[in-house]
Amino acid sequence: MPHFFRNESAHRATCIVAVTPPSHQPIAERGPGPMTMTAEEFRSHFPIFEEKAHLCSCSEGALSDRVIVAMSEFMTSWRVHGAPWHAWMEHVDLARGLFARLIHASPENVAVVSCASEAAYHVASTLDLRSSRRILTNDLEFPSVAHVWLAQKSRGAQTDFIAHKGGVITAEDYLGRIRGDHALVSVPLVSYANGLRLPVRTIADAAHAVGARVFVDAYQGLGVVPVDVRELDCDYLACGTLKYLLGAPGLAFLYVRPGLEFRVEPPLTGWFARQEPFAFDPGLLDYADDARRFQTGTPAIPAAFAGVAGMSLVLETQPQANLEHVLSLGDFLQDELLRAGFSLFSPTDRSLRGPQVSVLAQDAEGLGAFLADRGVLVSPRGQAIRISLHYYNSFDDARRVLQGVIDYRRTQPM
Ligand SMILES: Cc1ncc(COP(=O)(O)O)c(C=O)c1O
């Protein structure tokens, strides 16, 4: 284990800055290795498991040894070289490339943005609303994304919401609501609220049949749920790096289908959206021909370092093995919770479940705090706690959270 993990936490930050193990080739040059990591090997990269059961990747992915090294590389490069913009921008491009690899896209079809809301804003603000003025989404969409759709009211757009039934939204629910005047159909890959996996491709086909564009928020799945934008056939896909992609806040991406035509130029823009960002001509507003047209200003360089390290770990997992491991943990947890008489908000059908099992609780915050006191980290949301599962989680983690929830019920009604 790298020696900086053994330092007292008060000194940890300074030690990390000072220590870049000389044997570590920079991640930018190293790139991800072959897709062969076992779940145990993967877990060994995350020091938090020495003490805690991290089951909150839906909120923030666990910190890996590689991200710690990458962040120290960033700080060392800053301290030693002053302003190494060229190398930093190469890192941002590397992050773009790794993300493109994860979703089976070309890097030129990926814009680097700061968050998913910004990605959604670029999509909404460049919709041509002259003939089609409606946007279709659902009530399990992440609020911030739905808010961007709602905010298009000022441009004359109306947002329609499909209501979930018992935490489930089907393809038929969408197909019954898609109309000829929908400009955009928004489908989360996996819902943040309860881990429901949505049938994106079927919905995309129906949306395209009426000329609507399709937006996918992949934030709650990518990193565990394999994604191929060619198979999803979506027009846009947004995702940030801080959850299942195991990076840090500040970096997200927007995939834009090649060949998509734009009659409206992005109103939120900046020099990184120019055809030649370093032309420095304030009078020239020439949008890049590729997805970079959706970029704005200076990207979050530290988050790019973290994102490269996090995504490189994900890229070293075999996608089906990763998903199967997570689904098996979910099966186990779900069966045991149901057997013990708990009510779930996550779908019980395996084919509808993403990397999350969600348990209904009258006081979800109280339950979350009770579990945190025992070193079990989950994410309370509304009337449920979200137990999220990544390739690094083990059956022991699942047993720990199960026992914690059972113990809590002995003290409080659920
Ligand atoms: C599905 C989903 N989309 C988006 C976000 C975050 O959006 P943003 O990057 O704009 O903060 C979250 C965060 O929890 C999420 O779960």
Image (tube, helix red, strand yellow):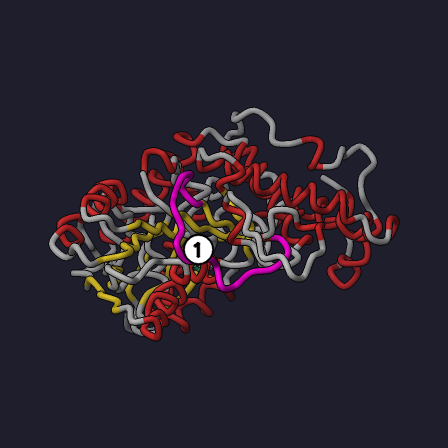
| Residue 266 highlighted magenta (yes or no) | yes
Residue lying furthest right: 80
Q: Which residues are magenta?
A: 256-272
| Residue 388 highlighted magenta (yes or no) | no
Residue lying at 51% horizontally and 44% vertically, measured from the top left: 289
Q: Position of residue 90 (x, y in %)?
A: 69, 41
Toward the viewer: 313 or 120? Answer: 120
Q: Position of residue 267 (x, y in %)?
A: 49, 64
- Can the viewer see residue 207? yes
Does 106 sit above or below residue 332? above
Task: Give left or right: position of 154 versus 16.
Answer: left
Image quarter for residue 350? top left
For label 1, the residue is 58
Toward the viewer: 162 or 111? Answer: 111
Image quarter for residue 163? bottom left
Residue lying at 43% horizontally and 32% vertically, measured from the top left: 319
Name the quarter showing ligand 1: bottom left
Toward the viewer: 327 or 243? Answer: 243
Task: Give left or right: position of 209 versus 258.
Answer: left
Q: SS for tag 1?
A: loop
Does 148 sit above or below residue 105? below
Image quarter for residue 124? bottom left
Hey, what amino acid is under mark 1?
A: Cys
Task: Give left or right: position of 63 versus 103.
Answer: right
* Label 1 residue near ligand 1, CB within 8 Å: yes
- Can the viewer see residue 335? no
Q: Position of residue 348 (x, y in %)?
A: 22, 49
Q: Position of residue 412 (x, y in %)?
A: 33, 73
- Pick the quarter of the image with the C terminus: bottom left
Residue lying at 37% horizontally and 69% vertically, measured from the top left: 147
- Number of other residues with Cα within 10 Å of mark 1, as a class: few under 14, some 14 to 19, many 20 or more: many
- Pick the quarter of the image with the N terminus: top right
